Image (cartoon, grey):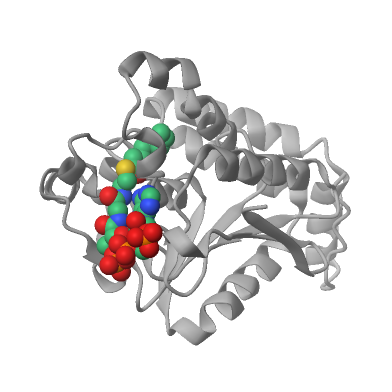
Amino acid sequence: MYVRVTRPEEGIGQIQLHRPDVLNALNLQLMEELVSALESMDRDEAIRCIILTGDRRAFAAGADIGEMSDATAVDMLLRDQFATWDRIRHISKPIIAAVSGYALGGGCELAMACDLIIASETAKFGQPEINIGVMPGAGGTQRLTRAVGKARAMEMVLTGNPISAEEALEAGLINRVVPEELLLDEALKMAREIAAKPPVAVRLAKKSVLKALDTTLETGLAYEQMLFYFLFATEDQREGMKAFLEKRKPRFRGR
Ligand code: CO8
């Protein structure tokens, strides 16, 4: 197994990439295991937020170069690895990437496919594919550009040079930077906070924010309004607003 699945606390699922010999290079098997684990947590009502992490040296140093080096275009097409990657987009629960060390190529793209990124001071984010004769293929030209803007994305993709955690923070790619030893604590803290919120509202709010990256303002606003109305069909809306008025803590049930 190349992923380790745990439940560090009630309501929180954690997946650790575990191919340390090759800096968690993302081969076909690892990706399949990862996406299956994400989907199984997505189906599990007891889990409300997911943490995805690597180890101290690497979140992931990219797709497995050995696995791709001899492939032809037709091999790649038939392998259709992106079908697996695309399944990550359909995970409805928030995923927090806790990144230490290298997040390069597919590793950076994987972090960007998550909803929030917390990095240790040692993290490095980059799209070095240009150095091995290709270009990003799993969102590196699209999500990165949306996150950091054209100037910085263009520089990262064309030079292949990585940026530090501090630079990534300043560019708006990630949410926060913490000392390495506090990385998982900080991810857990954020996950705990999200896990305490009403799950249906969390799920639809995630969907709506992602929609903003994908559509016009008019369509996005209409989409947001529909989801907002829908939440008035939930018990948690009643409970949340009633609790506020009664000056007590709400008890959300995910219904
Ligand atoms: N693939 C396979 N093996 C890798 C990878 C990788 N991406 N990265 C590191 N490794 C292996 C090394 O070969 C080495 O193995 P061994 O010990 O057997 O020689 C081991 O991990 C340790 O690596 P290094 O000795 O190189 O460690 P250093 O600390 O000297 O360097 C670096 C670390 C800078 C991260 C360096 O390993 C490196 O440059 N790695 C490659 C980074 C890269 O180019 N990533 C992009 C890959 S392409 C990609 O991600 C495209 C994504 C498209 C979507 C995916 C679906 C197809």
| Ligand 1 quadrant assignment | bottom left
Q: Residue sitting at 47 percent across and 75 percent down?
A: 56
Give the percent coordinates (x, y) of residue 68. Answer: 37, 34
Quarter of the picture containing the C terminus is top right
Q: Residue sitting at 70 percent across and 69 percent down?
A: 192
Residue 213 in sight from this viewpoint = no
Identify the image quadrant of residue 29.
top right
Q: Residue sitting at 65 percent across and 43 percent down?
A: 33
Q: Residue sitting at 45 percent across and 22 percent down?
A: 219
Q: How many circles with numbers are drawn on the protein? A: 0
Q: Give the camera-side residue of 48 and 8.
A: 8
Identify the image quadrant of residue 187.
bottom right
Vertically, is 113 above or below 101?
above
Give the percent coordinates (x, y) of residue 157. Answer: 18, 44
Give the percent coordinates (x, y) of residue 226. Answer: 63, 28
Q: Is residue 226 left or right of residue 156?
A: right
